[in-house]
Amino acid sequence: MPLDLTTQSLRSLKAVAEAGSFTVAAERLGYTQSAVSKQVRALETATGATLFTRTARGVQPTAAGRALLQRATAILDQLDAAQHDVDALAGRPAGRVTLGGFPATAVQLVPQALAQLAVDHPDVEVEFRALSTPAQIRQLRSGRIELGVIAVGEALPDYDLTGLETAVLPGGPMLVAVSAEHRWAGLARVSLDELRTERWIEGRGEAGEPQFGVWPSLGAADVVHTARDWSTRLGLVAAGLGVTTVPSLLAAGLPRTVAVVRVDDPSLP
């Protein structure tokens, strides 16, 4: 006789097996514990088999439970895929995408974009990875990420983007970050020559991978500290231990202990 099963009961079965607990499974599903127990009992009645046993480690599926779980998982995966296809045809984007971004984008640009995406397209899941531009290009080509936010332009390498679809995001000039107590804090601009007297905090990336740090056209500079991540770099700046170059997209997310200033540099736009 064909089994008369519901998707709700199959999801309850799967949740209990994964959680090892009726209580935890109910919390994950948003049901009451009694509702989950009722769904599992209905499955046991329909199959004529005991599906779970209680042990010292919690609830464990029996051999019959494991057999049904294997089929239930495949059925639920197919149903979820079908819903994804229907949503796509109806113009409702759904699914999972892996996004890369150079580390500065993680301060404000990417979090704001993901927050808006969650409102506009709640069925789209995004996994974000903070990666250097060269690492993103490699992972885009290998299929490890599907989208990337990379840094290109003046004073940066001429990356080979052949075969990759690109779109230009609104940008802005590079800036110099200084302590809020620095003599430049509050100024609109400084000259390139003025930068030569400053101590610099430099970014440290993988070998051969460029990082924001010393102003690109400055040449020789007094580098007093290097740091891999932005929080450390900006912490050193805030403490008055040096200055560093930052992209415009980072400016709005800086702490109040850090100020930014533009540079009159004829070699850059």
Image (cartoon, rainbow, N blue to C red):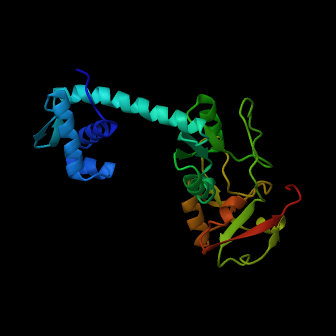
What residue is shown at x 26% (from left), y 47% (from top)?
A: 25
Whether residue 84 sits left or right of residue 199 in the image: it is left
Residue at x 79% of width, y 57% of height: 218
* Left or right of residue 49, residue 220 in this image: right
Query: Closest to the observer: 37 or 172?
Result: 37
Residue 97 vs residue 192: left or right? left
Q: Quadrant of the C terminus?
A: bottom right
What is the quadrant of residue 264 in the picture?
bottom right
Is residue 242 depicted above or below 151 in this figure? below
Foreground of the two, 109 or 215: 109
Question: Residue 4's spot in the image, x, y percent?
Answer: 27, 29
Q: Assign the N terminus to one quadrant of the image.
A: top left
In this view, the residue in front, 168 or 13, is 13
Tell me which corner region of the image, top left, top right, bottom left or bottom right, holds residue 60.
Answer: top left
Residue 200 seen in the figure: no
Q: Residue at x 72, y 29 (%)?
A: 163
Q: Position of residue 129 (x, y in %)?
A: 54, 45
